[in-house]
Image (cartoon, rainbow, N blue to C red):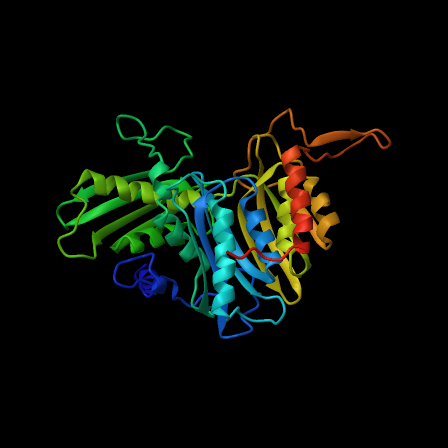
């Protein structure tokens, strides 16, 4: 546990988890074979989540000659955060021209601000980073914490006796005092999943708590974690109820962010400029919203996983994979056993009967708005970039 925290602490500078130097670690982005240069151009974005947001961002990147090499996007409590690594489409490598970087960032800011209210929290930043110094998942935790996504979390306190109801698989966090040793004891009970320990320790480290002892247990589908902690800053403690509640909500948020809602769609095809735009456009035109993304490259191929949900709350038709394959080629399939899928609905409008074959086929949801945006994206390549 101490070794894990020491590795995570190398990313902190002066106690500000959202500073420019925060992302200095030694992990590569998801799915990358490795950088082709000494730098990566990275887009970091946080803001209000809405259907089609990733599609619009990807369309702008493609129009401005940026090839996506890898990236991740999470959504939680109506907030969205993404980190996308891009290269110059004309010459492989980072975008080094500061004027062009500024122009691309300005256009992306216009997209994020297009549907937001005045004063809405949002952030768009495009910059060059030294290759191999950014741990994408760790940085996403920091971005969403800075965006205060934890404020909308709701703690589960169990029954009045403090015991949790039998069979409850929600996330439970409690903080108590161990006066004899001067520790605070944090107990976390949640569904078990990969990288659960990483997500929990990230939060404790970013909030400047030092773990002195820990116990982790897993039984069936549930995991239990117990931490004995102290604050790294002398004199700081959890005596205030507000501080304890903040720690509880931050831990719940960290556990929930990686939960995968919706149908998982995996894709493997030849990488090219505009691929992410094409894939996400198919989702948007069929009334689907992207809840989580992990994409990368392996050689000349692009690989990735998209978790999609129906904007109206209905069941996602697995035949969406065929629509993506028709648009992008390669291999596309769905994972029917993805955890935390959206509950089934008996009134899915994505299913239709083919009269010639008597089989169920994918039927795109058609709306004037979707048709208009589709045509605008297809025609956008004929126009030059907007300059202010």
Please indicate whether residue 297 sits to the left or right of residue 114 in the image. Answer: right
The answer, for residue 280, to whether it is visible in the render is yes
Q: Quadrant of residue 65?
A: bottom right
Give coordinates of residue 331: x percent, y percent.
Answer: 71, 53
Tell me: residue 343, above or below residue 221.
above
The answer, for residue 335, to whether it is visible in the render is no
Which quadrant, please, contains the N terminus? bottom left
For the residue pair 54 and 138, the one nearer the viewer reads as 54
User: Which residue in the rendered view is the most extreme toward the right?
Assistant: 356
For the residue pair 274 and 26, the one nearer the viewer reads as 274
Give coordinates of residue 94: x percent, y percent.
Answer: 53, 69
Q: Quadrant of residue 356?
A: top right
Q: Number of callouts in the render?
A: 0
For the residue pair 233 and 192, the one nearer the viewer reads as 233
Residue at position x 23%, y 45% in the image: 185
User: Which residue in the rendered view is the most extreme toward the bottom?
Assistant: 38
Tell me: residue 164, above or below residue 96.
above
Give coordinates of residue 298: x percent, y percent.
Answer: 62, 64
Give coordinates of residue 105: x percent, y percent.
Answer: 48, 58
For the residue pair 106 and 251, the one nearer the viewer reads as 106
Please indicate whether residue 286 sits to the left or right of residue 151 in the image. Answer: right
Residue at position x 54%, y 45% in the image: 53
Residue at position x 17%, y 48% in the image: 237
Q: Quadrant of residue 272?
A: bottom right
């Amino acid at each position: 546990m101490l070794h894990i925290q020491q590795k995570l602490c190398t990313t902190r500078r002066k106690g500000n988890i959202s500073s420019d130097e925060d992302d200095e670690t030694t992990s590569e982005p998801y799915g990358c074979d490795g950088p082709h240069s000494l730098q990566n151009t990275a887009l970091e974005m946080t803001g209000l989540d809405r259907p089609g947001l990733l599609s619009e961002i990807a369309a702008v990147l493609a129009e401005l000659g940026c090839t996506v090499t890898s990236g991740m996007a999470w959504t939680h409590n109506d907030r969205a955060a993404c980190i996308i690594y891009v290269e110059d489409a004309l010459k492989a490598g980072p975008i080094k021209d500061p004027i062009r970087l500024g122009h691309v960032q300005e256009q992306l800011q216009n997209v994020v601000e297009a549907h937001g209210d005045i004063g809405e929290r949002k952030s768009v930043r495009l910059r060059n980073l030294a290759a191999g110094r950014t741990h994408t998942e760790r940085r996403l935790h920091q971005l969403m914490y800075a965006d205060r996504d934890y404020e909308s979390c709701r703690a589960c306190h169990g029954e009045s006796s403090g015991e949790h109801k039998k069979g409850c698989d929600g996330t439970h966090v409690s903080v108590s005092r161990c006066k004899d040793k001067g520790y605070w004891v944090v107990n976390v009970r949640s569904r078990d999943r990969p990288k659960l320990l990483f997500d929990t320790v990230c939060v404790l480290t970013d909030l400047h708590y030092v773990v002195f002892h820990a116990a982790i247990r897993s039984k069936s589908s549930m995991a239990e974690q117990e931490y004995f902690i102290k604050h790294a800053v002398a004199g700081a403690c959890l005596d205030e109820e507000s501080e304890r509640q903040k720690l509880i909500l931050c831990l719940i948020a960290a556990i929930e962010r990686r939960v995968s809602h919706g149908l998982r769609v995996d894709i493997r095809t030849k990488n090219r400029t505009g691929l992410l735009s094409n894939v996400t456009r198919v989702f948007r035109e069929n009334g689907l919203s992207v809840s989580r993304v992990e994409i990368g490259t392996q050689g000349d191929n692009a690989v990735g996983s998209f978790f999609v949900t129906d904007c109206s709350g209905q069941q996602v038709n697995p035949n969406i994979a065929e629509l993506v394959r028709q648009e992008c080629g390669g291999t596309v399939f769905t994972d029917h056993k993805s955890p935390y899928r959206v509950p089934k609905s008996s009134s899915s409008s994505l299913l239709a009967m083919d009269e010639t074959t008597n089989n169920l086929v994918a039927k795109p949801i058609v709306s004037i708005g979707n048709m208009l945006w589709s045509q605008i994206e297809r025609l956008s390549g004929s126009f030059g970039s907007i300059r202010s």
